[in-house]
Amino acid sequence: MVLSDLAVGAVVEAKKPHACGGKEWKILRDGADRTIKCLTCGRILVLLPDELLKRARRIEGGIS
């Protein structure tokens, strides 16, 4: 996985589950940091790209 895979609209599967039990996150915003939303509970987080790559198991889709 590389940073270019982290495009807006991509769904990221996390290595560890969120507190709600969900493991899938959707990337909402791209830039110096990434805004992601839990697809189970709707919680929104802001992470640096390197931190998001570290937490990701796999990445699906996205708009390049």
Image: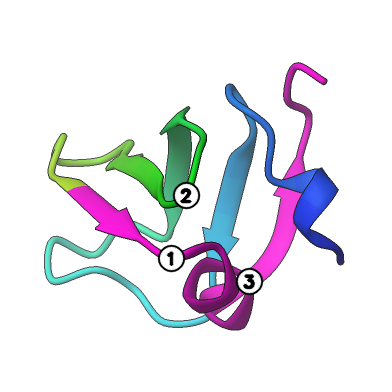
Residue 32 on the magenta segment: no
Q: What element carries label 1?
A: loop
Contact check, label 1 and label 2, Cβ < 8 Å: yes
The image shows residue 37 at horizontal and vertical percentages of: 29, 39
Q: Nearer the viewer, residue 14 or 3?
A: 3
Q: Mark 1 points at which residue?
A: 48
Which numbered mark, 3 or 2, is in the foreground of this view?
A: 2
Residue found farthest to the front: 32
Quadrant including the C terminus:
top right
- Check whether the beta carbons of the residues at disc 3 and disc 2 lie within 8 A of each other: no
Q: Image quadrant for the N terminus?
A: bottom right
In this figure, which residue is indicated by the disc labeled 3?
Answer: 53
Q: Is residue 49 above or below residue 31?
A: below
Q: x, y (%) of residue 55? A: 52, 78
Location of mark 2 (residue): 32
Nearer-N-terminus badge (3/2): 2
Q: Closer to the camera: disc 1 or disc 3?
A: 1
Horizontally, residue 14 falls left or right of residue 61, namely left
Q: What stretch is highlighted in magenta?
A: 45-64
Q: Of the two numbered discs 1 and 2 on the same chain, state the one appearing first in sequence.
A: 2
Which-is-in-front pick, marks 1 and 2? 2
List x then y, in percent, for residue 29: 43, 29
Q: Measure how far apart labels 1 and 3 are at the Cα level.
A: 9 Å
Is 12 rendered above or below residue 31? below
The amino acid type found where label 3 is placed reads: Leu
Q: Say which quarter of the image contains residue 56.
A: bottom right
Could you classify mark 3 by the number of other residues whose Cα lies within 10 Å: few (under 14), some (14-19), or many (20 or more)? some
Determine whether the residue tagged by mark 3 lies in a helix, strand or loop.
Answer: helix
What element does badge 2 sit on? loop
